[in-house]
Amino acid sequence: MPKQPVQDPTDVDQLSAVQIEERVEKTLQHIEAIKALWPGLERLEEGRRTRSVGRSLGVLGPPLAKLFALLRPKDGKDSALARSFHVLGDQDDGDDPERFEVELLERRMKRAVAEQKVADALEDLARHLDDDALATGEMVIGPGLAALDLARTIARQNASFRAILAPVLDDFRAMTKQARKGKKPEAPRPEPPAPEPI
């Protein structure tokens, strides 16, 4: 009788350790492939990122698109109106500082909108993965802490098990000590001054 092909689990909670590792590898390959689709992406330092006027594109994009459409060359020639905007030619980071390069700005605007669409989808996926990691962690921590507590009890009562459990309990104790060191005691609050007598 021929073997039936192994079906992929329909829920991540059913994945084996091997399947999880395979998915991590595939996912990271997909992420690298996505990066390769967008060569030359610029990364901003945090201060510039939070202050970037590029955040206004969502609001200013529609009127800019209409303006750029009016300024776009017709039959390969700029209109009189478009030529009036050439005074801004040195501000569009284009090839010709004497010309306001509307086609370049339109292409950049379309790219920014497209990149934001991809970024939103990836952010949604990242949030979903992060939420599942937290939810899965919750399923581990509850019984895990109970198991650590039981391990301490067993170690106190049985010397041979204590030796086996020692590395686990040593790590747990070290982690607990480190966590306590990280917490600084609160400084006493000064008492408010007593009201002056009338």
Image (tube, rainbow, N blue to C red):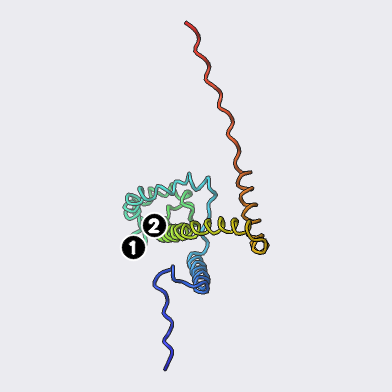
Q: Which mark is residue 174?
A: none
| Residue at point 61%, 49% (across, down) | 176
Question: Front-most of 81 and 152?
Answer: 152
**Residue tagged by mark 1?**
75
Question: Front-most of 28 and 36?
Answer: 28
| Rendered view: 133 above or below 11 | above
Q: Are marks 2 and 1 in contact (CB under 8 Å)?
A: no
Give the secondary structure at mark 2: helix
Quarter containing the N terminus: bottom left
- Amino acid type, mark 2: Val
| Residue at point 60%, 59% (across, down) | 154
Residue 160 horizontal/vertical position (percent): 67, 64
**Callout count:** 2
Residue 103 shows up from this direction: no
Residue 71 shows up from this direction: yes
| Rendered view: 44 above or below 17 | above
Question: Front-most of 196 and 102?
Answer: 196
**Residue tagged by mark 2?**
113
Q: Residues within 10 Å of mark 1 (few under 14, many from 20)?
A: few
Q: Earlier in the sequence, mark 2 or mark 1?
A: 1
Residue 27 horizontal/vertical position (percent): 49, 69
Give the residue at the far bottom of this rendering: 1
Give the secondary structure at mark 1: loop
- Amino acid type, mark 1: Asp
| Residue at point 54%, 21% (across, down) | 191
Residue 97 horizontal/vertical position (percent): 49, 52
Residue 142 horizontal/vertical position (percent): 48, 56
Question: Front-most of 148 and 12?
Answer: 148
Give the residue at the far front of this rendering: 157
Q: Residues within 10 Å of mark 2 (few under 14, many from 20)?
A: some
Q: Nearer the viewer, mark 2 or mark 1?
A: 2
